[in-house]
Image (spheres, rainbow, N blue to C red):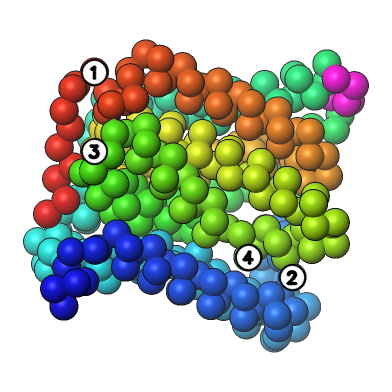
Amino acid sequence: MKKFQTKPLLYYVIITYCITWLCWITAILMGYEEISFFKLFSWDFNNSKQMILFFIFRIGVYGPLLASVLVTFWRFKRDGLKNLWRRIIKWNVPIKWYLYLLLIPIGINLFAVLAGVLTGLSFDDFFQSEIPWSLILIYFSYQIITSGMEEPGWRGFALGHLQNKYTAEKASWILGLIWAIWHYPLLISLYHNQAIISIIFSLAGFTMVMIGQTIIYTWFYNNTKSIFITILHHAWGNTATAFILGTVATHNPMIGLLSGIFTWAIAALLLKIFGGETLTKDEMISMDLT
């Protein structure tokens, strides 16, 4: 018990990986195949096995959330869970943060479109999502209750513990690496037909993009103390990418590289303006973990 109490972040990461990887690897080995959101919206599964594997895989998405609840309760009891919940529902922040979370993902993706067109791609290759534009709000809501629910773990739990020991910048590098590795079973299943060296480069590139994104998330969280804002940012980022870049991002690695470059441009600008110590105008920040 004492050892657990002194290493909550380590146990959080272990529990998160175990929950997610167990579900993902099990589903993948049993033949899981991602279905389009439109088919999901229409509840158009090919068979009962596909439906079961879909739910097993989706449970894995909640690994960060479940681990944060378990470790928070074990470490801080009910007061910790109340604090976590308060930050999850904290929506009352200055309106500029809603504008930032809306515009930054759009800017990153439009930069990729512009750069892609300038390097020879057709403009018609973009904005070709498999999801009808009429479903964008429904897709955004779906992202909130799936990928967005990672945030009580990554920003609501892990970030605070890391910043108790490290600067905001260093904590972001560490958390970005943890967050990226968490995705590896899924990515490896997607890249498995590629050469080993290509898989390694793809994972390395993905990891660097995730670290850049984590710096942006840290900036959001440290300035608002709101998990709600990071949930919306996560969900809207996925939505903007799906509808602006569409399917071209999955077929053209260069588009992912371009998005990553602009992500890091924003991250570098934030570090320049706000400093790597806290990514805020304040020299000290309170994590308020309990």
Q: In percent of the image, x 89 and y 25: which residue is there? A: 122
The picture quadrant where one finds residue 63 is: bottom left
Checking the image for residue 225, the label placed there is: 3
Tag 1 residue = 281
Image: magenta residue range:
119-123
Is residue 16 a member of the stretch shown in magenta? no
**Residue 148 sits above or below residue 240 on the image:** below
| Amino acid type of the residue tagged 2 in the rendering | Glu
Sequence-earlier tag: 1 or 3: 3
Tag 2 residue = 33
Can you say which quadrant of the picture contains the C terminus?
A: bottom left
How far apart are the alpha carbons under marks 2 and 4?
A: 14 Å
The picture quadrant where one finds residue 195 is: bottom right
Prevalent SS, magenta region: loop
Q: Residue extending furthest left? A: 79
Which of the two marks, 1 or 2, is nearer to us in this view?
1
Q: Position of residue 40 (x, y in %)?
A: 66, 65
How far apart are the alpha carbons under marks 1 and 4?
A: 38 Å
Sequence-earlier tag: 1 or 2: 2
Residue 137, can we see it? no
Checking the image for residue 185, the label placed there is: 4
